[in-house]
Image: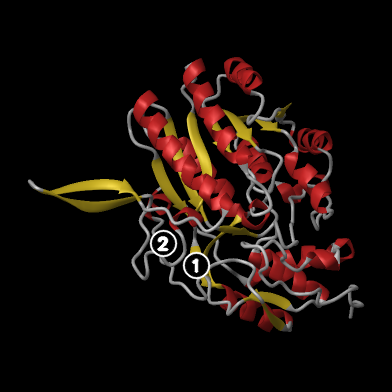
């Protein structure tokens, strides 16, 4: 297929672009390189050294003989150029990663990029008549955490009974949203946009409600140091398990916020790229409502993860104030039947993959800035955060 990967220079987009190219798809990346600019804004870099996009792409061609196209384009602000690219490439599928992805960072900003980017894309597809299967990376956070109690969260839709004077009507609706951050709110708005444009214009859309991504490398990104994927460890963009692995690798206490009773859904980056291919290869037909797939493989309580890493790596645990407004504990049971039926073989937590993350953290430990480890983006002004736990990197054993 001809595939456009929007946001293809990012943590999920880059390995997805390489994976799809490796599988024989004709891939073009659209990206405004904003994630690199956010590094400059936050004054923190990926733990792994990320090469310029041109060097990355040249390395891929050198190693595989395959080319990946690149267009530097901001789909939130450059609508006319987006239309031109769609008309020129006529993609069979579009993978939409082009949104700011971090909940803590979203509490610093308006995150208007997310809303404008998605709406521009949908309008451009209607205007051009390009009949591409659209797969969008959403989040489990649209469901909220704890709203459903111990009831399994279905894949997108919930059957409800509506009382009327003439009796009950049975309807399927989008699962009620309960976003916990500005970032999650933008993904909730995406859902409503998708529902409208699927119904009104027949767009073929799959919304992927993804869990927290852990791991760094895929088979493709591991082929050459120039292809290495991002490993964010800071308090805004670092995901919890990757942060624990980095903290343990440098001798920093594992930072558990609040009680650690928060339960979250997880997926390894190797499964993320596989799920994307399954989604664009099995889209809904025109006229159907958006297909919603829960892109998760397992759930874990944060404190349980911390204890697992602490036991393996002989690390300490520090209990810190929680900068988020959330329940101290929650249940989370998630259905992922559709991906399993499509052939996904889940990659679950294993010592081997934890060791991979630990090895990367140790290899690049000298790139860690200790002042960026503590999470300090708060959900409401005045909330307590912790001081730095270490000022300098401890000496290696």
Q: Could you tell which of marks 1 and 2 lies nearer the N-terminus?
A: 1
**Tag count in the figure?**
2
Q: Is residue 90 above or below residue 138?
A: above
Quadrant including the N terminus: top right
Find disc 1 in the rendering and name its residue: 299
Disc number for residue 181? none
Give the x, y percent position of residue 70: 72, 28
- Residue at image position (80%, 39%) is 56
Image check: 315 left or right of 135?
right
Task: Determine whether label 1 and label 2 are within 8 Å by CB.
Answer: yes
Disc number for residue 334? 2
Scheme by which the image is coloured: secondary structure
Task: Pick the residue in front: 105 or 128.
Answer: 105
Image check: 287 left or right of 193?
left
Residue 355 appearing in the image? no
- Residue at image position (66%, 69%) is 383
The residue tagged with tag 2: helix, strand or loop? loop
Give the x, y percent position of residue 69: 71, 27
């Amino acid at each position: 297929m001809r595939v456009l990967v929007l946001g293809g220079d990012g943590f999920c987009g880059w390995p997805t672009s390489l994976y799809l190219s490796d599988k024989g798809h004709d891939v073009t990346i659209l990206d405004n390189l904003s994630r690199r600019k956010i590094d400059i804004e936050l004054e923190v870099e990926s733990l792994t050294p990320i090469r310029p996009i041109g060097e990355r792409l040249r390395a891929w061609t050198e190693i595989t003989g395959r080319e990946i196209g690149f267009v530097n384009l901001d789909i939130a602000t450059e609508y006319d150029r987006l239309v031109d690219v769609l008309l020129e490439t006529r993609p069979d599928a579009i993978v939409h990663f082009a949104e700011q992805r971090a909940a803590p960072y979203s509490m610093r900003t308006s995150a208007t990029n997310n809303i404008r980017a998605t709406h521009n894309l949908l309008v451009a597809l209607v205007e051009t008549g390009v009949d591409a299967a659209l797969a969008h990376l959403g989040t489990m956070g649209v469901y909220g955490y704890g709203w459903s109690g111990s009831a399994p969260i279905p894949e997108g839709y919930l059957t409800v009974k509506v009382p009327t004077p003439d009796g009950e009507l049975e309807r399927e609706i989008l699962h009620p949203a309960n976003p916990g951050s500005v970032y999650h709110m933008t993904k909730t708005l995406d859902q409503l946009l998708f529902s409208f444009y699927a119904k009104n214009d027949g767009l073929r859309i799959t919304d992927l409600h993804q869990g927290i991504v852990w791991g760094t490398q895929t088979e493709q990104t591991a082929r050459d140091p120039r292809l290495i994927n991002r490993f964010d460890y800071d308090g805004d963009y670092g995901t919890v398990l990757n942060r624990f692995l980095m903290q343990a690798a440098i001798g920093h206490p594992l930072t558990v916020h609040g009680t650690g009773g928060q339960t979250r859904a997880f997926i390894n980056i190797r499964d993320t790229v596989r799920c994307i291919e399954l989604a664009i290869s099995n889209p809904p037909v025109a006229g159907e409502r958006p297909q919603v797939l829960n892109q998760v493989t397992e759930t874990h309580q944060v404190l349980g993860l911390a204890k697992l890493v602490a036991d393996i790596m002989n690390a300490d645990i520090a209990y810190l104030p929680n900068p988020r407004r959330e329940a101290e504990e929650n249940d989370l049971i998630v259905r992922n039947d559709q991906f399993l039926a499509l052939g996904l073989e889940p990659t679950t937590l294993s010592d081997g993959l934890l060791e991979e993350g630990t090895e990367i953290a140790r290899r690049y430990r000298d790139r860690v800035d200790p002042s960026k480890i503590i999470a300090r983006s708060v959900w409401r002004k005045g909330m307590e955060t912790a001081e730095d736990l270490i000022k300098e990197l401890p000496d290696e054993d």
